[in-house]
Image (tube, grey):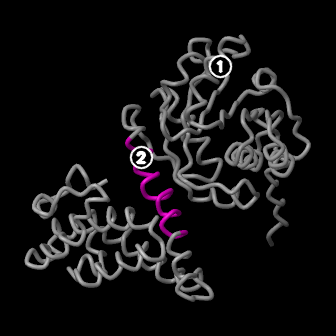
Amino acid sequence: MNASAAPEPRAEDRPARLTVGVVGAGRVGPALAAALRLAGHRPVAVSAVSDASRRRAAELLPDVPVVEPARVLALADLVLLTVPDDALPGLVEGLADTGAVRPGQLIVHTSGRYGARVLDPVRRAGALPLALHPAMTFTGTPVDVQRLAGCSFGVTAPEELRLAAEALVIEMGGEPEWIAEDARPLYHAALALGANHLVTLVAQSMELLHKAGVAAPDRMLGPLLGAALDNALRSGDAALTGPVARGDAGTVAAHVAELRKHAPGTVAGYLAMARTTADRALAHGLLKPELAEDLLGVLADPSAGATGTAGAADGPQGDDR
């Protein structure tokens, strides 16, 4: 006969292992600290300047005091530096100059652009530097904590800290992906190209559908974009479809004419993406060369910075950005 099993202890009931501080209560920091709390760590301090950041801190980290950045370092074993990329080097220098950094303290930044090298000023003071970038868009709400489950993190750290970095990612529910120091800018550019520009394209598409009289553009686009994303992730360029990949120059010309009439601000982006799509379709044998000339003639729009059609048919060109 089985004895009643003891209930699994809840994360919040476990003894805290690390005290956690957040410098910069934007959309990312409070969510990561909340995830670490679920893993048994204890958030103890957060710095926040704007009213919005204070509200986020109060929602995601209730009862955690808002203090100055130097005080965050004084209280925490693990410090999350979650500020905009351009502000990070100056923040690190400033914190090192305060003398608040302690030997053995874990200092983590979440910038995609930088690796661990940007933390050299605090490393010289004895801190342990980690770069942990969650490859996810954040809303600044509790839903972000749930979305961390299965989220990939770009991890860069000194080799001796690799296991510690990966363990923290796993505790937050993420999947560590090791990124070399020198590859961080390229890694971040790739993510921005795929995710940030996607939001712009989808927003433009919804606006145009509204103008075309579609009552629920989101409902129309959802299945289409979901299928396109799934196909692209599975098959890459082989998933290309549509008038550019088919070489339908007349259809593309009609698109450009309509966009000029109803949404001229979208023309340059449409032409740039269409030229890039044509280049990739040609390179992968999806666009027939005999159909490419007329299509590339439509896309060679001087106002968009194109230089002609001959080079475009041979592969990606300098103007195709």
Q: Mainly helix, strand or loop, the magenta region?
A: helix
Residue 242, quarter of the rendered image = bottom left
Amino acid under disc 1: Gly
Vertical arrangement, residue 84 with respect to residue 220, above or below: above
Which of the pair 174/65 is nearer the observer?
65
Q: Secondary structure at mark 2?
A: helix
List x then y, in percent, for residue 126.
61, 14
Q: Which residues are magenta?
A: 186-203
Say which residue appears at 60% left-offset and 34% top-offset. 109
- Magenta stretch: includes residue 276: no
Quadrant location, the N terminus: bottom right
Residue 2, quarter of the rendered image = bottom right
Say which residue appears at 48% left-offset and 63% top-offset. 198
Q: Which residue is mark 2?
A: 189
Q: Which residue is mark 1?
A: 104
- Magenta stretch: includes residue 201: yes
Say which residue appears at 45% left-offset and 28% top-offset. 159
